[in-house]
Amino acid sequence: MRTRLNQAWALAAVLLASATASSPLHAADLPPPPLPQVYDQPPLPDQNVFEGWWLGGTVGGATVNYDLAPVGGSADTSGVLGGVVGGYSWQSGPFVVGLEGDIMAADINGSGAFNSGLNRVNPNIDAMADLRLRAGVTVTPQVLVFATFGGAWANADLPVKGPGGGPGSADLFGWSVGGGAEVALSPNWAARFDYQFTDFESETIKYPGGTLKLDPDANTYRGSLIYRF
């Protein structure tokens, strides 16, 4: 009886070993591990971030030099200005063109002597505005460098103190050229810095004691924070 039981156990062991040998389990037979999940790529930045309507606030400083004729000499003035700036831009690839304008309150004053120091003119500009064309190119999708050209206006008080002097004022008109850079901070907000040179036409002002011809040139430096609609 024990001999037959031992023979049965031996036969079972042989069959189990045979089955295991005929179906080996290799690593290659294992199912492949799941691939890591691939998420959608973030959208590329808008290549036309500078296109559209925009409006902002601007503040800066200015110097205005007046040549005095026919008496000779000059009057040097400086001060601050600030207001609103806005416009519209079109963009094609890296190229941007547009139309822009601003209107600003100002306090740009100083003085200059003439007539051997007997008279003194005290110019003061209290408002400025301009309308310009802008053309530029993006150096990165979010950074634009540009140049501007257009017309300018300023309101100036031009009183003269001394013999034959008196009050005076004029609307100054001229042309302007400049340039700067604009950086897109977000899809809607941007920061901007620009310089502008303005050559105003000369103005002849009549005073009780005679006439004085003033020929002003302006340099302005401004920073702006703008919102693009």
Image: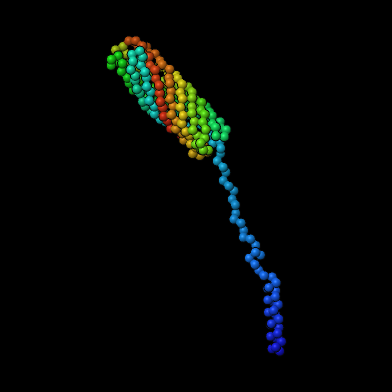
The picture places residue 94, in percent across and down from the top left corner, at 55, 34
Residue at 65% from the left image edge and 64% from the top image edge: 28
Q: Quadrant of residue 104?
A: top left
Q: Is residue 27 above or below residue 199?
A: below
- Can residue 134 be seen in this snapshot? yes
Q: How many marks?
A: 0
Residue at 68% from the left image edge and 73% from the top image edge: 21
The picture places residue 75, in percent across and down from the top left corner, at 34, 20
- Can residue 229 be seen in this snapshot? no
Q: Is residue 136 rendered to the left or right of residue 222?
A: right
**Image quarter of the N terminus:** bottom right
Residue in front for this viewpoint, 70 or 128: 70
The picture places residue 216, in percent across and down from the top left corner, at 39, 20
Residue at 59% from the left image edge and 48% from the top image edge: 40
The picture places residue 183, in percent across and down from the top left corner, at 48, 36
Residue in front for this viewpoint, 47 or 153: 47
Q: Is residue 29 rendered to the left or right of residue 104?
A: right
Q: Is residue 229 rendered to the left or right of residue 82?
A: right
Q: How is the image coloured?
A: rainbow
Q: Is residue 51 above or below residue 27?
A: above
Residue in front for this viewpoint, 98 or 128: 98
In this view, the residue farthest toward the bottom is: 1
Residue at 46% from the left image edge and 23% from the top image edge: 176
